[in-house]
Amino acid sequence: MQIQGPYLLFLGDTPRPLDAKTASGILDWRPELCGGQYRLSKDAVDLGLRDYTPAEAAAAGIRTMVIGVAPFGGAIEPEWVEAILAAVRAGLDVASGMHTRLGDIAAIRDAARESGAQLFDVRHGNGTFDVASGRKRTGRRVLTVGVDCAVGKKYAALAIHRALVKRGIAADFRATGQTGILIAGGGIAIDATVCDFTAGAAEALSPGNAPEHWDVIEGQGSLFHPAYAGVSLALLHGSQPDALVVCHDPRRTHIDGYPDYPLPTLAACIALNEQVARLTNAHARAVAIAINTHRMSDAERARALAAVRSETGLVAFDPIATGADAVVDALIPQREAVLSEATP
Amino acid sequence: MQIQGPYLLFLGDTPRPLDAKTASGILDWRPELCGGQYRLSKDAVDLGLRDYTPAEAAAAGIRTMVIGVAPFGGAIEPEWVEAILAAVRAGLDVASGMHTRLGDIAAIRDAARESGAQLFDVRHGNGTFDVASGRKRTGRRVLTVGVDCAVGKKYAALAIHRALVKRGIAADFRATGQTGILIAGGGIAIDATVCDFTAGAAEALSPGNAPEHWDVIEGQGSLFHPAYAGVSLALLHGSQPDALVVCHDPRRTHIDGYPDYPLPTLAACIALNEQVARLTNAHARAVAIAINTHRMSDAERARALAAVRSETGLVAFDPIATGADAVVDALIPQREAVLSEATP
C-alpha cells in the first residue's frame, strides 16, 4: 500500500478539532505531504492550509484526497459521498481510515473504475502475506511497545524517526495502524491481518536494508492486554527489533476499558518484552521509556521523567514535549557496533 | 459451525492410508459419527465401514459427506467434483478441510443452492467475533500447549476428553483446527481469524458453563514458534485455562522447519506458558506433559515417561499408548476445589 502525496485533507463540516485528529496528525508529522484542505462549510475546522475543491486540487498537482475526520464510530457520512465522488471524478485517489470501505459504496466504486482512481481503505487488510520465516534481516530496527493500548506508541515512533533523520541517519517510519499509514503514506494495518500471517506481515513491513539503516516500527496493543497481546507478540517477533522503546502512562491504573486488569509495572513490561523479543533477536533490549506528559506542568513533567529514569536506568522522554534526541544517543552505540562489524 | 452427523467418509481412490489420515482420525475418536464410507475405486483405503453411494447414504439417514482424504497440498481434485455434486444432489451437506473452498467451485455452489445443502469449509474462517472481554467465565478449562507445532496437541486434548467422559465428568472437546473440527463436528479454525479478534474467538469457543464442567481445548502453535506464537498467546488468553497440558517431543532438536530455532526446554515452556496464562486466569498451572512415544519400544517409552515425570514433577502420558486417565486425577483436585467453592 503506497499512497501518493501531496494530500488534500478532507475536513467535512465538523467544527470540532478533536474530530479532525487524523488530519492534524498528518499535518503535524508530514507537513510536506499536505497540499491543501477541503472543507464543506466555513464553520469546519481550519488547519491553515489553502482551501481547494477537488478539481482545483487536481489542477494544482495534488494526488490523493485523505479523509481527515472521524466523527462517530468510523462510518462514512452520507453527506461525504458527493465530496468523495467529486474527488474521484477529478482524478484524485482517495484514502480512508473509516470502518465502511470506500469500495462498498457502489457509486464510489463505479466512479473509481471509470476514472482509474485508486481507493485506499487503510483500516482493512490489503494483500496476502507469507508465514514468517524467522530469518534475521540486515539493517537495524526499533519497535515501540506499551503497557497498554493508546499510550503513545505511534507518536513515540514518529518522534524517534524525526530525531534520527535530523541527525542525518537513514531511517524509515513503518506504520502498522490506520492513522500511521495515512501519515506515512504506506504501511500495513497489522491488526487486520489473519493471525497465521501476522508475524509474516511484520517481516514484510521492515524488509532487509543497509546495515546502518533504522526502521522505526509503530507498535500495537500490549503483551498485557487480554484481547490484543497476540497481535503485539506477532508484531514483536516479526519485527525482530534490536531496540525497544516502552510507552508508559504513569497516571493510568488499569488497562483501558478492562477495570479488572491492573496496569503492569514498568519493570514487568520491560522484562516480558525483552524476554519474548529475544526469540527472534537475541540482542533485543529496551533503551528508552516514552511518557505522555501532555497535561503536566513543567515541574511535574521534569519529576515524572526523572522518576522513570531512576526507576529503569533508561532514557525517558515525551515525544512532543522533549522530542527523542536522547533516544538517538541511546541507539547510536548499537549502530556503531554494527558499523564496526561491517568494517573488520 | 455445527456439522451434522452421521458422516459419510469420502476416501476418493487413494490406496495410501496416510492420505486418509483425516478419515481415520474421525473414526478413531468419534466412531459413533461414522455412518459409512464412499470410495471411488476398489483399491481405495478401506476403513471397514459400510460402502455407500451418496444416494444410498442419504436414504440410510446419513447427513454429511466429509472429505476424508488430503493427497497433495490440500486442493480439491478434479475427479472429486462429480462425487461432491452427487452428495449435494442427494441432499447431503459436505464438509471439507481443503484449501480450495467448496463454494468457489461454481457447479458445487449452484447445486448446493438448489438442494439447500450446506457447505462447510473448515479450514477457512466463519463468522465474526467480538474483541475479547477478558471477563472470567464459569466452568473449568484445560488447554493443550506445546514446545512446537505438530507435537500432538489435538490428540492429547482428545485423549483427555475421552478420559473425562469415561470417568463420568461432563466435558466438551473444543476444536481449533480443521481436523479437530471435523472430528468434533464443530469448532473455530482459530488460525484463520483476524488477529484483533483471535482472543475473542477463543472466548466464544468455550463459553461459560456449569462450574464442574470441563472444556478441553485443542491448542495451536507454540509460544516459541517465530511465526505462530501470537496465535498461541491469543488462544491462551481467550481460553483462560485453569490447567495446561504441555505437549513435548523429546526427539526433536529444533522448531520444525526452522533450523535456527532450538526447541525450548520443557522447563522454559512450562514457565512461560504459566506466566502469560496468569494474565487472564491467576490460577493457571501446568498439570501434565504429553509425549508422542509412537515409535518407541515399551522399555524406551517407560524410560521417556519416567524421565519427564522426574524432570517436571508432573503427570506424563502418551495420548494413544497410555491414555489420559492420570491427567483426570491431576484435574480432579481443581474440580473438587470448585465444588467446595460452590457449596460453602
Image: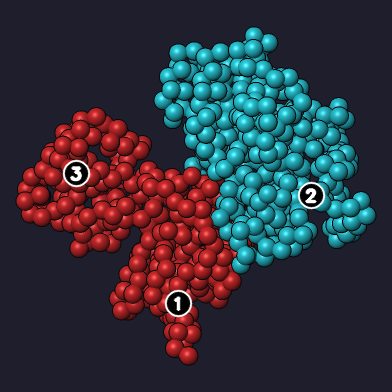
Chain colours: A cyan, B red
To which chain does the residue with label 2 belong? A
Instruction: Determine contact: label 3, label 2, CB under 8 Å.
Output: no
Q: Which residue is mark 1?
A: B331
Of A305 and B104, nearer the camera is: A305
Q: Which residue is mark 2?
A: A292
Amino acid bearing label 1:
Leu
Amino acid bearing label 3:
Ala
Looking at the rendered structure, whether the residues under marks 1 and 3 are on a common chain is answered as yes
Amino acid bearing label 2:
Asn
Q: Is residue A263 above or below residue B11?
A: below
Other residues around mark 3 within 10 Å, as few (<14) / some (14–19) / many (≥20): many
Q: Is residue A53 visible?
A: yes
- Tell me how far mark 3 sits from mark 2, CA to CA: 56 Å
- Tell me how far mark 1 sits from mark 3, CA to CA: 41 Å
Q: Which residue is mark 3?
A: B117
To which chain does the residue with label 1 belong? B
Q: Is residue B11 above or below residue A335?
A: below
Of A67 and B83, nearer the camera is: A67
- Tell me how far mark 2 sits from mark 1, CA to CA: 46 Å
* Relative horizontal placement of residue B144, taking residue A255 as reference (left or right): left
Question: What residue is at 56 percent from the left and 69 percent from the top?
Answer: B281
Count of numbered tags: 3
Other residues around mark 2 within 10 Å, as few (<14) / some (14–19) / many (≥20): many
Which x, y percent locates residue B270? 58, 65
Of B30 and B41, nearer the camera is: B30
Q: Is residue B206 above or below residue A190?
A: below
Taking the view exactly as shown, the residue that stands out farthest to the top is A59
Question: What residue is at 39 percent from the left and 45 percent from the top?
Answer: B125
* Relative horizontal placement of residue B133, taking residue A37 as reference (left or right): left
